[in-house]
Amino acid sequence: MSTSTARRHHWPLAAEARYLGPHEGTEPIDVTVVLRRRGNHLSPAAWPHAPALRREDFGARWGADPADAERLRGYARQHGLSETGCELHRRALHLRGTPQALQQAFGVQLGRYQFADGGPVMLGCHQPPSLPPEISPAVIAVLGLDKRPVARPHFRRPAAKPSTTYTPVQLGQLYGFPDGTDGSGQTVAVIELGGGFTQSDFTQYLQSLGIDKVPSVSVVSVAGGSSQPGGDADGEVMLDVEVVGALAPGAAIAVYFAPNTDQGFYEAISQAAHDTTRQPSVISISWGGPEDSWSASSLAAMQSALQDAVALGVTVTVASGDSGYTDGESDNQPHVDYPASSPYALACGGTRLVASGGSIQGETVWNELSSDEGATGGGVSASFALPDWQQSSKVPAGANGYAGRGVPDVAGNADPTTGYQVRVDGQDEVIGGTSAVAPLWAALIARCNQQLGQGLGDPHAALYGIGEAAFRDITSGDNGKFKAAKGWDACTGLGSPNGQALLTALAAMKPTN
């Protein structure tokens, strides 16, 4: 594989699209209207407190108010829109209409957009949707009027074959994943916005690692998305699933494929969180985009889905990005990646790991920016305030002195030059990136959940309370701006895991009956 091909690993984001003129199509368009939840002050299920709400009970207490849905239905009918589905428990009303009807109903002008390097012409709208005052308070977002991609996968292929690589099993041993656990009884959800899953590769890969009982993988299509092997993003999909399968072989895996749009991303998280069939206890996300590239309403919708997840006792692990402190933006200013920057996400940063003889010899911040091989994302959110559980972490001031949420929370091996041995599209290869760290942590949490007998839910308060006892503190390196230091830092968070120590500390927190 050539170097140029090896580095083609993500899509440009919506801000880089060029307006070509008004939308001219007449085909109906499906939109998702995200409604506010009934009730106030939905709290996360945070270990060891606040047991998770049952999925079966969630809708009656925290779903959408049926009266809100009825008002919106009436408005939709007035504008010639048809209802294609309604899931009040997860606050989603699905409408379909012609472009002209949608423009009138939501006060937008649909346009055609294209990226500077060519590619398909995409539907988009410049201004945010609007609704009359008697309806707008009930609506968080109208998603589906903009089909431009919102996220990129955070994986990196090395430019040259590295001399140091690891299987996920080896990393689990190095990071002290707890003995006697394999994730049995748990389901790990994996969110994908592109690429495809190949069962034969997955089976062969795990058997090559000596794992005879291959975990079951369910492929779930969301909002018109589907598993489509054959593209570059297959590297993301197979990396995610193979890391989880190798490190939590007793767990079931559910892969939710959605379009790379704000509608698709929201729907994937929401459907995974509320899935009463598969009932995931962990969601792993290795896709994201710069925090400031999201519209306010899309961000609010995503936050509401992530909040649902943690209230249901689901832990969400998210890659923090592979482009250092700028998150790939061209202004040379610090930016963090979303949804890693969400306070409901366990943000996963990257390290460079060197081991010998089954033990770690050194671990530093992943930073290969000088050779165009990426670096861990990390910094300070400009959208989310400093959470209570980070108050003593010495998070630096953000832009204009804003006291924002620090990213990441935790870390793990991500440098592609010390990458993961995986199998993609029939070929064995090496892949790195913080994309690998989100499923690594998801697998560890699944194994902890198995032993603890319930889901961790939002783990932040517990992890920050436990601190250095359960982590390898990374104190050397930087991501281009932020430097590693003793304790939490904006490169590797609290550090990489000491799995058995973490489980022991979490178990000690659990109240005895």
Image (tube, rainbow, N blue to C red):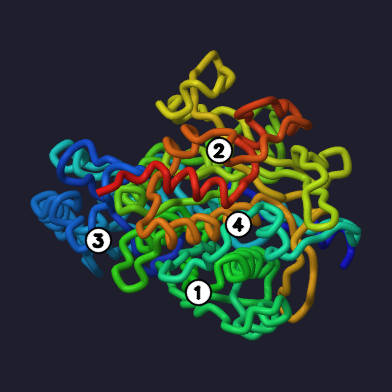
Q: Which mark is on residue 226?
A: 1
Say whether disc 2 or disc 4 marks the residue closer to the N-terminus: 4
Q: Is residue 148 above or below residue 47?
A: below
Q: Residue furthest top?
A: 401
Residue at 69%, 44% (x, y): give it. 350
Q: Secondary structure at mark 1?
A: loop
Horizontal and vertical percent for residue 349?
A: 64, 43
Q: Nearer the viewer, mark 4 or mark 3?
A: 4
Q: Report the residue marked by disc 4.
A: 177
What whole-number distance in Å separates the C-alpha atoms at marks 1 and 2?
31 Å
Q: Secondary structure at mark 2?
A: loop
Dot 3 crowding, Cα within 10 Å, few <14, some 14–19, many 20+: some
Residue at 31%, 61% (x, y): give it. 274
Residue at 64%, 63% (x, y): give it. 236
Looking at the rendered structure, the kind of residue marked 4 is Phe
Quadrant for the N terminus in the image: bottom right
Q: Nearer the viewer, mark 2 or mark 4?
A: 4
Horizontal and vertical percent for residue 404?
A: 49, 24
Residue 182 in sight: yes
Residue 129 in sight: no
Looking at the rendered structure, the kind of residue marked 2 is Asp
Looking at the rendered structure, the kind of residue marked 3 is Arg
Give the side of residue 260 with respect to residue 142, left or right.
right
Q: Report the residue marked by disc 3.
A: 55
Q: Is residue 32 above or below residue 462?
A: below
Q: Nearer the viewer, mark 3 or mark 1?
A: 3
What whole-number distance in Å separates the C-alpha atoms at marks 3 and 1?
25 Å
What whole-number distance in Å separates the C-alpha atoms at marks 4 and 3?
29 Å
User: In which image quadrant can residue 303 be found?
Assistant: top left
What whole-number distance in Å separates the C-alpha atoms at marks 1 and 4?
33 Å
Q: Report the residue marked by disc 2.
A: 409
